[in-house]
Image: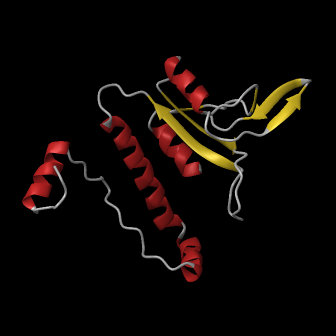
Amino acid sequence: HAKFREFLFSENFIGIHSPKLIGGSSEGGASVFKLEYNGQPACLAQSPQLYKQMSICGGFGRVFEVGPVFRAEKSNTHRHLCEFIGLDAEMEIKEHYFEVCDIIDGLFVAIFKHLNENCQKELETINRQYPFEPLKYLEKTLKLTYEEGIKMLKEFNSPIYY
């Protein structure tokens, strides 16, 4: 998560810390850990989403949080995570959704580059148990407009409906 923070700070994001003990469910669809706090019903936060959106509405523009998330969802798997560290980011869009695409693109490239340059030993260890092909990515992700995508489909006689 250090690379996540570092990249977002470099893109003028502000780190926030939202409450983890709240008075009600923070997401409608997910199960919640309920408890009593000083004689009042409370629960553990399922997401910092509301607080990120409030920060954006309050004029911060770009915010992120690295922090615990609690989900009381039932599961029959041994890998289910009811508590994990979430990496959340939120930003206002000033003119076009490509602004968000550029941030996500830059974030993943920074993380992939860091892994390839600094984590070879760890990647080799994982590869011995779970073989994988080295990750390939572009320094700048290809972006197409809708019109360019349709033109390419037509040129290659794609059976997809357009």
Residue 3 drawn at (x, y percent): 54, 50
> Height in image: 85 above or below 128?
above
Residue at image point 69% right, 64% down: 77
- Residue drawn 73% across the image and 46% down it: 72
> Which residue occupies 40% across, 42% down?
103
**Outermost residue, bottom direction?**
128
Seen in the image, is 16 located left or right of residue 141?
A: right
Kindly identify the residue that appears in the image at 67 percent across and 30 percent down: 18
Q: Nearer the viewer, residue 7 or 54?
A: 54
Q: Position of residue 159 (x, y in %)?
A: 16, 61
Indicate whether 141 appears above or below 67. Answer: below
Q: Position of residue 32 (x, y in %)?
A: 73, 39
Which residue in the rendered view is the most extreme toward the top?
58
The colour scheme of the drawn protein is secondary structure
Task: Judge left or right: residue 153 versus residue 10.
Answer: left
Whether residue 49 sits left or right of residue 103 in the image: it is right
Residue situated furthest right in the rendering: 39
Question: Closest to the observer: 126 or 145?
Answer: 145
**Can residue 59 be seen?**
no
Q: Is residue 120 above or below residue 74?
A: below
